[in-house]
Amino acid sequence: MKWLADENFDNDIIRVQDLPQISGEDDPAMLAWATTNGRVVLTHDLSTMIPTMREHLRSASLCSPIVLVPDSLPIGSVIEEMLLLDACSVESDWAPGVIYLPIG
C-alpha cells in the first residue's frame, strides 16, 4: 500500500508539504490527489478529514481510505501499525472509509 501523511503529521514521515504539487492545498485537493495516486491518507485531523471524505464521495465514485492517528500515539507505534496493515491486507480491503489507530 502507498501512504500519504496529512500536513499535520509528524516530520519523520513524508508529508503533503513535501510534495510541491499539493503543498499548502486544502483537504479536498489533498484527498483528490491521494485518490488519483492510489494513496492511503494518514492524518491526525478527525474534525475535517471525515467531512472532506464524505463530500468527496458525493461527487466521485472513488476515494482514498483515511487512517486516523491520535496525536498521542508514538511514531514507532504508528509505523508498526502501518506495517501490520500492509502485511495483513490486500488491495481490495482498502475501500473508502476510515481506520482508527491503534488497531488492537
Image (tube, rainbow, N blue to C red):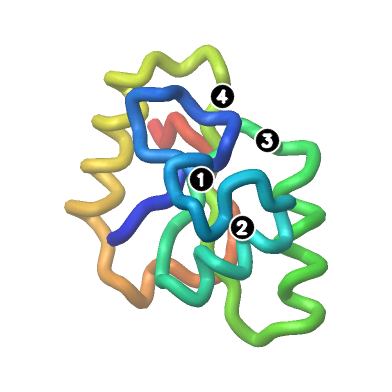
Q: Mark 2 points at which residue?
A: 30
Q: Sequence-wise, which precedes: disc 2 or disc 4? A: 2
Q: Sequence-wise, which precedes: disc 2 or disc 3? A: 2
Secondary structure of the residue carrying numbered label 2: helix
73 versus 80 height, above or below: above
How crowded pointer 3 is (Cα within 10 Å; few <14, some 14-19, many 20+) is rated as some
Q: Which residue is drawn at 68% across and 62% down?
A: 29
Q: Quadrant of the N terminus?
A: bottom left
Quarter of the view holding residue 90: bottom left
Q: Which residue type does callout 1 highlight?
A: Val
Question: Gap in Å between the C-alphas at discs 3 and 1?
Answer: 13 Å
Horizontal side of 78 relative to 52 (left or right) equals left
Q: Residue at x 78, y 82 (%)?
A: 59
Q: Sequence-wise, which precedes: disc 4 or disc 3? A: 3
Q: Which residue type does callout 3 highlight?
A: Asp
Q: Which residue type does callout 2 highlight?
A: Met
Q: Disc 2 or disc 3, which is closer to the eye?
A: 2
Q: Residue 45 carries which label?
A: 3
Q: Name the residue under label 4.
A: 70
How crowded pointer 4 is (Cα within 10 Å; few <14, some 14-19, many 20+) is rated as some
Horizontal side of 32 relative to 5 (left or right) equals right
Q: Sequence-wise, which precedes: disc 3 or disc 1? A: 1
